[in-house]
Image (spheres, helix red, strand yellow):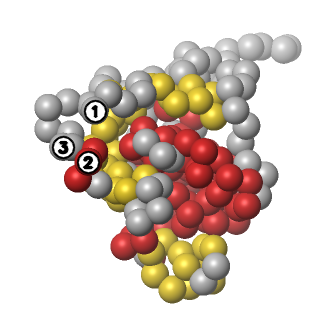
Amino acid sequence: MVLPEHVQIGQLPQSAEEFITLRDQIATTPQGGAAAMVAALLLYAADEQLGLQCLTIAVDRDRLEAGTTGYRGWQLRRREMQRIETQIKAGPHIPRSYIDGATPENGYVLPALPYVLAFSDNPYSGDPDSGTYKLFVSCSGASSPRPVTVKRNDRGIWKAHEWSSLISGVKAPARSTEDDL
């Protein structure tokens, strides 16, 4: 099965409903499911409440528990949420490192839309027909692409199942040395 190597995100959603629309459009492939997770992390870094809703929507059901901080009575498991919170607060630029054109040298400034994410796989990625697939997203802040495992749900939508490497630290953004004295 030949899968797309790039996924484009034309616009970041402004609500959970818009995120569902985006997810349903792109997450029909493993790469699209991983891209939806990156989009949810981008949203979380900018708006924690919206990000929590979108993360709940982007991840596999077995990574959720009943709760009120997510979406429609579900939320990320407490341990998963604590790790995301800790990592993204320490490095809000981490999710931007997966967008082509956002680099440590330019402070991970997002390029003009659409955002493009590049993916690869390897001989150990598995078979997408099995419903579980491991792929790798290009990361400008790391020496190699970052793995993410996705699972296809009963509606044919791919959702993030294991994403811990997506929230691992990346190279620090370059600091401006402007002197306005």
- The three-letter code of the residue at mark 3 reads Gly
- Residue at 65 percent across and 57 percent down: it is 20
Q: Do labels 2 and 3 touch, CB within 8 Å?
A: no
According to the image, label 2 marks what residue?
129
Instruction: Identify the mark nearer the N-term, 1 or 3.
Output: 1
According to the image, label 3 marks what residue?
126
Q: If the image is split into quadrants, where does the C terminus sit?
A: top right
Q: Residues within 10 Å of mark 2 (few under 14, many from 20)?
A: few
Q: Give SS at disc 2.
A: helix
Separation of residues labelled 1 and 3 (CA atoms): 11 Å
According to the image, label 1 marks what residue?
1
- The three-letter code of the residue at mark 1 reads Met
- The three-letter code of the residue at mark 2 reads Asp
x, y percent for residue 99? 55, 28
Q: Give SS at disc 1.
A: loop
The label shown at residue 108 is none
